[in-house]
Image (tube, rainbow, N blue to C red):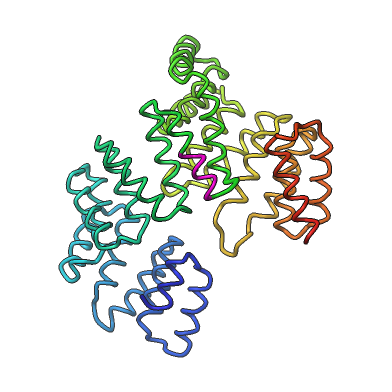
C-alpha cells in the first residue's frame, strides 16, 4: 500500500488530499495521487469530479483501480447491474482483490441473492483479513440470512480484531437483544464502553437496554398491547418505540414515528427515537437525525433532552476539518442548559464541548455548577465531572 493509500486507510482524509495535491504539483500525471483524489471525490459524492480524475488515470491504461472506481460510482448511483459487472471485471483481472469481492457482495445483497452475497463477502474477508468493515458486513448478512451462530461469532471476531470499531458493538448488542438475550446485549455495550469510554451511542443504547432489563418480555408485551389499544397516544407509542430501539428494530420504530408525525401527533420523545434510527443507518443519515432533533426541540420548548442529544450528535459527526460542528454544538448545549439548569447531563456535555473548543474557563464554570448539585458520590455524571475538573486544572 502506497503512502497516500495508507493515509486514506487511517481515516486521515484531509492529509491524504493535501499530500496528493502536492504530488500532482510535481507530477501532474501521477496515477497514485489521481486515484486517491478520485476516491476522495467519491466519498464526498462529487461524481463528475471523480469521473474526470478516473479518465486521467485511464488515459495511461485501464487497471483494476480504475475499474473498481467506476464500479463504485455505479454502485453509489444505484446502477446495480453496471456495478456488479464492474466488480466482476476487477475480479477477472485481480482474483484476490478484496474490495471487488466486497463490492460484488454488497450488490448481490441488494438483489436479494443472499447466498451468493455471503460467498463474496467471505472471500473479501479471506483476501482482506485486516479490514474490519468487510468482516462486519459479513456478520450482518449472516444474521439477516438466519445464520445466527455464524453471524454472532463473526461480529465478536470484529470486536476482538479492532476493539475501537463501534458499529460492531451496536450490531452485536442488537442481535442479542432481538433474541431476548438482554443481559448478553448489555455486557457487549459495557465492553464497548471500556474500549470507547463515554461514547454517546453506546451510552444511549446501554441506557435504553438497562431500562428494558427490568423485565424485557413483560415490558415489551405490555407496551405493545398498550400501543395497540391507544394508537393515537403519543406516550404509549414513544414507550413502545424505546423498547423496540433496545431490540434494534429500527425500521419498525421509524415507521411508528412517521405514522405519528403524519397524524400530527409527534412529540419530543418520538422525534428523538426517529433521530436514533437515522443515525443507526449505514451510512448514518446525520442530516436527517439533526432535523429530527431540531423538530423535537420545537415540539417541547421547555424540554432539554432533544437539545442535549442534538449537541452530542454534533460533537460526534465526522467532519473535515475536524471540529467543524463544534460551535453549533456549544450553542445547542447552552440552550439545553438554559432549559434545564439543574440537570447534570447538559452541564457536563457543555463543559466537555467547551473544553474541546479550548474554552477552559467556561468549561470550569459548568463543572463547578454541576458539582454543586445534590448528586451522590457514586453518580456516573458526577464522577465524570470530577475527572474533567482535574484535567482542566492541569490544562
Farthest-out residue, top: 229
Instruction: Give the position of the C terminus as an image quadrant.
Output: bottom right
Relative vertical location of residue 32 with respect to residue 90 in this rendering, above or below: below
Residue depicted at 54% across the width and 23% down the height: 238
The answer to whether residue 207 is left or right of residue 46 is right
The spot of residue 74 in percent (x, y) is 29, 59
Q: Is residue 4 visible?
A: yes
**Residue 148, how many percent across, how many down?**
28, 36
118 and 382: which is toward the camera: 382
Q: Position of residue 108 (x, y in %)?
A: 22, 49
The residues colored magenta run 188-195
User: x, y (%) of residue 345?
Assistant: 70, 38
Q: Is residue 17 left or right of residue 34?
A: right
In this view, the residue in front, 355 or 49, is 355
* Magenta portion: prevailing SS class: helix
* Relative depth, front residue between 318 and 58: 318
In the rendered image, the quadrant that contains the N terminus is bottom left
Q: How many marks?
A: 0
Q: Based on the picture, tell me whether residue 157 belongs to the magenta stretch.
A: no
Q: Residue furthest front?
A: 378
Amino acid at each position: 500500500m502506497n503512502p497516500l493509500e495508507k493515509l486514506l486507510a487511517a481515516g486521515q482524509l484531509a492529509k491524504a488530499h493535501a499530500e496528493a495535491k502536492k504530488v500532482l504539483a510535481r507530477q501532474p500525471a501521477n496515477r497514485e495521487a489521481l486515484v486517491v483524489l478520485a476516491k476522495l471525490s467519491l466519498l464526498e459524492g462529487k461524481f463528475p469530479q471523480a469521473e474526470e480524475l478516473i479518465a486521467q488515470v485511464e488515459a495511461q491504461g485501464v487497471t483494476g483501480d480504475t475499474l473498481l472506481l467506476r464500479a463504485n460510482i455505479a454502485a453509489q448511483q444505484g446502477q446495480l447491474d453496471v456495478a456488479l459487472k464492474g466488480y466482476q471485471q476487477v475480479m477477472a483481472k485481480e482474483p484476490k482483490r478484496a474490495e471487488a469481492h466486497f463490492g460484488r457482495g454488497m450488490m448481490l445483497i441488494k438483489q436479494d441473492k443472499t447466498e451468493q452475497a455471503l460467498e463474496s463477502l467471505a472471500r473479501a474477508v479471506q483476501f482482506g483479513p485486516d479490514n474490519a468493515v468487510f468482516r462486519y458486513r459479513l456478520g450482518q448478512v449472516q444474521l439477516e440470512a438466519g445464520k445466527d451462530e455464524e453471524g454472532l461469532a463473526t461480529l465478536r471476531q470484529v470486536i476482538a480484531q479492532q476493539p475501537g470499531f463501534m458499529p460492531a458493538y451496536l450490531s452485536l448488542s442488537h442481535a442479542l437483544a432481538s433474541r431476548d438475550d438482554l443481559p448478553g446485549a448489555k455486557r457487549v455495550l459495557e465492553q464497548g464502553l471500556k474500549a470507547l469510554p463515554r461514547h454517546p451511542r453506546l451510552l444511549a443504547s446501554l441506557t435504553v437496554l438497562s431500562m428494558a432489563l427490568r423485565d424485557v418480555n413483560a415490558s415489551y408485551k405490555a407496551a405493545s398491547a398498550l400501543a395497540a389499544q391507544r394508537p393515537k397516544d403519543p406516550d404509549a407509542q414513544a414507550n413502545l418505540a424505546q423498547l423496540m430501539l433496545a431490540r434494534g428494530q429500527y425500521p419498525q420504530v421509524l415507521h411508528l414515528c412517521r405514522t405519528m408525525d403524519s397524524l400530527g401527533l409527534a412529540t419530543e420523545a418520538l422525534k428523538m427515537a426517529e433521530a436514533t434510527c437515522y443515525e443507526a443507518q449505514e451510512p448514518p443519515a446525520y442530516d436527517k437525525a439533526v432535523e429530527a432533533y431540531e423538530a423535537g426541540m420545537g415540539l417541547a420548548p421547555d424540554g432539554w433532552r432533544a437539545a442535549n442529544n442534538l449537541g452530542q450528535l454534533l460533537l460526534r459527526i465526522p467532519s473535515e476539518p475536524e471540529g467543524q460542528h463544534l460551535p453549533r454544538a456549544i450553542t445547542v448545549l447552552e440552550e439545553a442548559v438554559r432549559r434545564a439548569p439543574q440537570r447534570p447531563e447538559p452541564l457536563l456535555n457543555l463543559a466537555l464541548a467547551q473544553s474541546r473548543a479550548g474554552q477552559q474557563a467556561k468549561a470550569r464554570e459548568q463543572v463547578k455548577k454541576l458539582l454543586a448539585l445534590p448528586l451522590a458520590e457514586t453518580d456516573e455524571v458526577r464522577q465524570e465531572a470530577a475527572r474533567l475538573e482535574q484535567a482542566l486544572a492541569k490544562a
